[in-house]
């Protein structure tokens, strides 16, 4: 008997109770995902409310009352203090760095020197690294495997049945369920 005839002769039986059970689990998963989404949206709103209260409402009320600190009956205290944040826009980086250097603050600018080598240039990279270090330069060498490259390597090895040190690579293999809502 050839494969086509054998496949045609096999009758599949579907256990409708088990199918209904699976469908019920899938519906429960969808409901849980919707609840998480609503919670995340609510969390964003709460964080914005917190920011407004912390950075605007309370400082303005305390300033209007002429106080910078308030102790409450339960022993807790409310205090308003300055908060600072800074970020140099990429479009202004050269200008900002020039200003810092011209005004004697150039030492806060850190220079990271990176040199990229090709796949077959390990020996050249190591030699240059050691040469710079021997000349007294504070050289930092960081070696890494990109996350996506490692993932692809592990996937390929596992699919091909090759043994690799799973613990060494922190490999986790599992089945995941993805459900897409019907529009």
Image: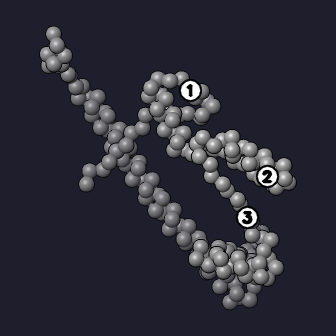
Instruction: Assign a secondary structure to mark 2.
Output: helix
How far from the left and from the top, in percent, is residue 10?
Answer: 18, 17
Query: Of the residues under marks 3 and 2, which one precedes in the sequence?
Result: 3
Q: CA distance from mark 1 to mark 3?
A: 39 Å
Instruction: Assign a secondary structure to mark 3.
Output: loop
Task: Determine whether, in the image, residue 7 is placed left or right of residue 101.
Answer: left
How far from the left and from the top, in percent, is residue 70?
Answer: 75, 78
Residue highlighted by disc 1:
164
Residue highlighted by disc 2:
132
In the image shown, does 68 or 157 lie closer to the viewer? 157
Task: Determine whether, in the image, residue 63 is placed left or right of residue 2.
Answer: right
Q: Quadrant of the N terminus?
A: top left
Q: CA distance from mark 3 to mark 2?
A: 15 Å
Query: Of the residues under marks 1 and 3, which one precedes in the sequence?
Result: 3
Which mark, by number, is residue 111?
A: 3
In the image shown, does 128 or 175 lie closer to the viewer? 128
Can residue 45 be seen by looking at this rendering?
A: yes
Instruction: Assign a secondary structure to mark 1.
Output: loop
Q: Nearer the viewer, mark 3 or mark 2?
A: 2
How far from the left and from the top, in percent, is residue 9?
Answer: 14, 16
User: Dot 2 surroundings within 10 Å: few (below 14), some, or many (20 or more)?
Assistant: few
User: Dot 1 surroundings within 10 Å: few (below 14), some, or many (20 or more)?
Assistant: few
User: Dot 3 surroundings within 10 Å: few (below 14), some, or many (20 or more)?
Assistant: few
Residue at point 55%, 44% (across, down): 147
Q: Nearer the viewer, mark 1 or mark 3?
A: 3
How far from the left and from the top, in percent, is residue 116?
Answer: 62, 52
In the image shown, does 170 or 29 lie closer to the viewer? 170
Query: Of the residues under marks 1 and 2, which one precedes in the sequence?
Result: 2
Q: Determine the image quadrant of residue 88.
A: bottom right
- Is residue 109 depicted above or below 21 in this figure? below
């Amino acid at each position: 008997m050839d494969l086509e005839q054998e496949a045609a002769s096999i009758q599949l039986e579907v256990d409708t109770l088990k199918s209904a059970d699976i469908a019920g689990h899938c519906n429960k998963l969808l409901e849980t995902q919707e609840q998480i989404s609503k919670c995340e949206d609510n969390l964003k709103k709460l964080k914005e409310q917190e920011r407004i209260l912390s950075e605007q409402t309370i400082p303005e009320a305390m300033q209007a009352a002429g106080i910078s600190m308030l102790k409450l009956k339960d022993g807790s205290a409310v205090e308003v203090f300055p908060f600072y944040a800074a970020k140099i826009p990429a479009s202004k980086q050269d200008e900002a760095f020039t200003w810092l250097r011209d005004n004697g603050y150039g030492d806060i600018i850190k220079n990271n020197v990176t040199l990229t080598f090709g796949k077959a240039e390990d020996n050249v990279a190591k030699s240059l690294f050691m040469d710079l270090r021997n000349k007294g330069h504070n050289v930092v060498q960081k070696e890494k495997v990109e996350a996506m490259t490692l993932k692809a390597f592990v996937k390929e090895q596992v699919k091909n049945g090759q043994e690799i040190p799973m613990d060494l690579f922190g490999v986790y293999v599992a089945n995941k369920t993805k459900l897409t809502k019907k529009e």
